[in-house]
């Protein structure tokens, strides 16, 4: 009840509140995640019912100017961008709900949408003063501006094949722990990543194939993923990339 009261109170905030210092605890987003995310799966129906609260949080992101953003610390910037990516992804699904997959958004043919990256190139929100799309946050900001490959385990594209959506907002004061937790939890997901010692075969999510340069700047790919496995992976292990599941990461 206390959390619900807090969310309802947010609805009554005046525009003056948004003009004040940005909330780097992302409190409203944190409460929404705690309410509508369970074991990494999302109640999109729940987000639909709370869409006015979600829109209020997104509005607070939109109101951050580029000048204000440049004054953020590195951890504040990373947290801001990760939360923005995840929250706007939820918004994209909510705006088209019900859908079976994010790849259904765009043309009538999901394979075309996926091949062309249509859902991720759709400009449907404002951020730092301009119209943006999800790919801009991921490729032009997070990957380009920060040497932090663990962002790939924190941003979630509304699909089962993605890392799980955490039930809390990313915040600067806890960012290191959160990113490491996201990395380890993803690597320990046996449907996405596993090691067969008998055949010396390492099965990895296609994320490690798509963005391999991000993971191999300081080590080999096997060395990078090793801390997510209890068993020592041989350096000459054969790597096989698993099928990516684009079904919606939803619980009913």
Image (cartoon, rainbow, N blue to C red):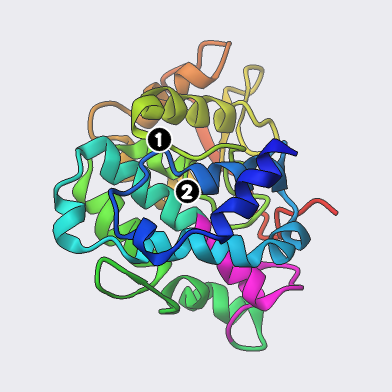
Counting from the top left corner in percent of width and height, residue 227 is at 46, 17
Between residues 95 and 218, which one lies in front from this camera angle?
Answer: 95
Q: Quadrant of the N terminus?
A: top right
Q: What residue appears at the point 63 percent right and 68 percent down from the top-left corner?
A: 93
The tag earlier along the polypeptide, 1 or 2, is: 2
In the image, the segment drawn in magenta is 87-106
Q: Residue at x 40, y 25 (%)?
A: 174
**In the image, which disc is placed on residue 155?**
2
| Residue 72 visible in rendering | yes
Classed neighbour count for the residue bearing mark 1: other residues with Cα under 10 Å, few (<14), some (14–19), many (≥20): many
Q: In terms of depth relative to the viewer, which is nearer, 33 or 13?
A: 13
Please give the name of the residue rendered at 58% of the width and 48% of the height, measured from the top-left corner: 162
Residue 98 x, y percent position in the rendering: 76, 73
| Real-space CA distance between mark 1 and mark 2, rounded to the nearest whole angstrom | 14 Å
Q: Is residue 99 left or right of residue 133?
A: right
Q: Is residue 136 above or below residue 68?
A: below
The x, y position of residue 27, in whole percent, is: 49, 42
Give x and y (percent) for residue 164. 61, 41
Question: Which residue in the protein does label 1 denote?
Answer: 171
Quadrant hosting residue 47: bottom right
Name of the residue lying farthest toward the right = 252
Please state, as top left, top right, bottom left or bottom right, where the C terminus lies in the image. bottom right
Question: Residue placed at 57% from the left, 67% from the top?
Answer: 91
**Which one is in front in this view, the residue at disc 1 or the one at disc 2?**
1
* Main secondary structure found in the magenta portion: helix
Disc 1, SS:
loop
């Amino acid at each position: 009840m206390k959390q619900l009261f807090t969310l309802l109170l947010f609805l009554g905030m005046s525009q003056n509140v948004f003009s004040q210092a940005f909330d780097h605890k992302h409190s409203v987003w944190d409460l929404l995640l705690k309410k509508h995310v369970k074991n990494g799966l999302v109640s999109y129906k729940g987000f639909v019912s709370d869409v006015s609260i979600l829109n209020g949080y997104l509005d607070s992101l939109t109101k951050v100017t580029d000048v204000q953003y440049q004054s953020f610390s590195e951890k504040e910037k990373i947290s801001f961008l990760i939360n923005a990516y995840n929250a706007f992804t939820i918004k994209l699904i909510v705006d088209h709900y019900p859908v079976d997959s994010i790849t259904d958004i765009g043309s009538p043919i999901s394979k075309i949408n996926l091949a062309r990256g249509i859902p991720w190139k759709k400009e449907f929100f404002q951020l730092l003063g301009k119209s943006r799309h999800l790919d801009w946050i991921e490729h032009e900001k997070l990957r380009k501006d920060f040497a932090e490959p663990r962002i790939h385990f924190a941003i979630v594209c509304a699909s089962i094949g993605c890392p799980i959506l955490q039930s809390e907002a990313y915040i600067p004061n806890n960012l290191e722990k959160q990113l490491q937790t996201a990395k380890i939890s993803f690597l320990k997901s046996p449907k996405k990543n596993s090691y067969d010692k008998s055949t010396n075969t390492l099965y990895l999510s296609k994320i490690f194939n798509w963005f391999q340069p991000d993971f191999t700047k300081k080590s080999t790919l096997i060395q990078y993923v090793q801390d997510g496995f209890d068993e020592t992976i041989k350096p000459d292990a054969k790597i096989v990339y698993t099928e990516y599941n684009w079904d919606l990461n939803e619980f009913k």
